[in-house]
Image (spheres, rainbow, N blue to C red):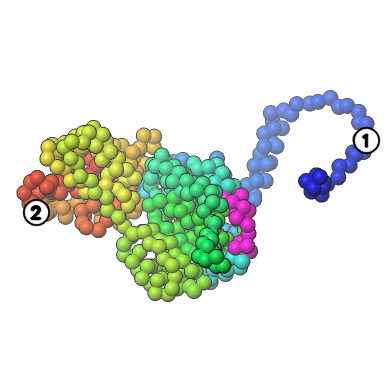
């Protein structure tokens, strides 16, 4: 009975509909194809008036995104995302962003003014009390919507990555997938947010609660433009924090699309803000007292700086710094499986990832497999990321290309044997791209599909006998 009373209170009373006046039947007329096209055109025009490109690669719909490396006739300046609105920057300093496959201008990225950075923090501060008080179930529903929107815009996000960062389209879709998996994990946060109760005596218990920190920031690298922002956006927000995201100034397009999707998913104003720039923005994030925690992914030098300076100010800082990946090939391994795995690990993503296999130690008879490994590397197709069948794209910038070539040259000067040399390679269609990948020769991590093969442990050490792989000989 109580349940029925409750149901009665929640459902409005039904009323009878008044009898409709009789209308003479009209003969049905099928709209002509011309009429249909006119209606569709009007609707499309009306929709487009409500949309504004926020960067040259952040197209306005899941069906509208770049699919070639053709030059953009009128590149659009990248905007900030503050208080749930895309805001044009009043910056006086701009960073040109070029397509790595062609070096054509794609967009200009602002170094925001101090006032713009402060506006982002103020927006987050204003949003935090209400967002913190929002129920976990309500946040979960927003996260469900965000996950669905990411799936709907999957190709659009990947195309932005290909055009700005240089990854092949297939690799860029994998970048989005890894981030999507974090968003899906965040949807199950309700089982992970519970506190604990510990009965320490008959008349005493200890309770613990999980509380949001407040305003937090994420500083992201260039090599995973969707995945790493999605390490932060879902988990920071669903736990009740407000996030200030700084994507890499080299490829912010995917982050701008994600900001748009956050708004469409129902995030309140100020919960997610996106600002751009370089060292000035990083220093602002570190020094602003309202920002309580920083998550960073990137190089050793930058990470150590952010960690030490941020920690000294009492901030929580998690810094994922540069990594090196090594492999040892033993004689009892499956030869074909090992060679295929090594080729993928060493040369995938143009070597521009922390876990790229940079050093390979061949033990015993396995050193005789090197020519076959070189053949597998040589068979990889290096081309523009939108081209069908491309295995590897260009590296991010001409500076990276120069650095890689200098590392290979220095190894050669030291007496290394270059089994496969890709310096000077250019696809016919894209002669102006950054077509030499990074190399890993020194002790610090360098992003590129180049392998260093030191002396195996069963041979006497010889400083002048090293083997360097480079996959781009065509």
Quadrant for the N terminus in the image? top right
Mark 2 burial class by Cα count in 10 Å: few <14, some 14-19, many 20+: few
User: Residue 15 vs residue 321: left or right?
Assistant: right
| Residue 400 in magenta stretch | no
Residue nearest the viewer, comparing 451 with 382: 451
Q: Is residue 197 left or right of residue 392?
A: right
Query: Quick check: is 138 in the magenta stretch?
Result: yes
Where residue 369 sits, quadrant-wise, is top left
Image vertical order of residue 122 relative to residue 40, above or below: below
Eyeballing the image, is 207 above or below 193?
below
Residue drawn at 27 percent across, 53 percent down: 324
Q: Is residue 423 visible?
A: no
Residue 118 coordinates in the image, percent (x, y): 53, 71
Q: Residue at the far top: name it.
A: 27
Nearer to me, 298 or 472: 298
Find disc 1 in the rendering and name its residue: 19
Query: Pointer 2: what residue?
Result: 463
Q: How many marks?
A: 2
Residue 81: image location, x then y, percent? 55, 60
Q: x and y percent of residue 82 in the render?
A: 56, 62
Q: Residue at x 36, y 34 (%)?
A: 389
Residue 401 position, x and y percent, is 28, 52
- At horizontal 16% and vertical 53% (from top left) the residue drawn is 411
From the image, which quarter does the C terminus lie in? top left
Q: In 3D space, how far apart are the residues under numbered discs 1 and 2 (Cα atoms)?
A: 97 Å
Q: Which residues are magenta?
A: 130-143
The reply to whether residue 456 is visible in this rendering is yes
Q: Nearer the viewer, residue 90 or 393?
A: 393
């Amino acid at each position: 009975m109580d349940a029925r009373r409750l149901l009665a209170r929640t459902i409005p009373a039904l009323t009878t509909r008044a009898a409709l006046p009789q209308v003479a039947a009209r003969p049905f007329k099928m709209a002509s194809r011309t009429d249909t096209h006119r209606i569709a055109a009007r609707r499309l025009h009306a929709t487009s008036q409500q949309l504004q490109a926020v960067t040259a690669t952040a197209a306005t719909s899941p069906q509208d995104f770049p699919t070639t490396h053709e030059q953009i006739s009128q590149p659009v300046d990248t905007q900030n995302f503050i208080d749930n609105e895309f805001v044009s920057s009043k910056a006086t300093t701009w960073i040109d962003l070029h397509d790595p496959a062609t070096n054509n201008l794609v967009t200009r990225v602002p170094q925001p003014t101090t006032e713009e950075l402060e506006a982002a923090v103020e927006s987050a501060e204003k949003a935090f009390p209400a967002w913190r008080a929002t129920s976990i179930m309500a946040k979960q529903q927003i996260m469900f919507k965000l996950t669905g929107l990411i799936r709907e815009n999957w190709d659009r996000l990947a195309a932005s990555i290909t055009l700005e960062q240089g990854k092949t389209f297939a690799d860029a879709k994998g970048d989005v997938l890894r981030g999507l998996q974090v968003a899906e994990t965040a949807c199950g946060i309700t089982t992970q947010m519970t506190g604990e109760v510990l009965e320490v005596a008959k008349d005493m218990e200890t309770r613990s609660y999980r509380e949001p920190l407040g305003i937090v920031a994420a500083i992201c690298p260039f090599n995973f433009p969707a995945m790493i922002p999605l390490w932060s956006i879902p988990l920071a927000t669903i736990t009740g924090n407000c996030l200030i995201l700084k994507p890499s100034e080299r490829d912010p397009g995917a982050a701008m699309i994600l900001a748009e999707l956050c708004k469409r998913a129902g995030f309140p104003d100020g919960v997610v803000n996106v600002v751009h720039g370089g060292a000035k923005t990083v220093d602002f994030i570190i020094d602003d007292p309202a920002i309580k925690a920083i998550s960073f992914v990137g190089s050793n030098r930058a990470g150590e700086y952010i960690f030490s300076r941020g920690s000294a100010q009492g901030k929580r800082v998690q810094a994922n710094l540069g990594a090196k990946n090594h492999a040892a090939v033993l004689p009892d391994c499956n030869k074909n499986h090992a060679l295929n795995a090594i080729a993928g690990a060493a040369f995938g993503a143009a070597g521009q990832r922390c876990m790229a296999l940079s050093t390979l130690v061949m033990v015993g008879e396995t050193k005789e497999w090197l020519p076959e490994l070189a053949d597998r590397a040589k068979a990889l197709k290096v081309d523009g990321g939108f081209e069908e069948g491309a295995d590897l794209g260009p590296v991010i910038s001409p500076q990276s290309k120069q650095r890689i070539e200098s590392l290979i040259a220095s190894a050669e000067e030291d007496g290394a044997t270059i089994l496969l040399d890709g310096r000077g390679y250019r696809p016919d269609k894209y002669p102006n791209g950054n077509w030499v990948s990074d190399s890993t020769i020194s002790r610090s991590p360098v992003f590129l599909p180049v392998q260093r093969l030191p002396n195996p442990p069963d041979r006497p050490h010889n400083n002048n006998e090293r083997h360097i792989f480079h996959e781009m000989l065509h």
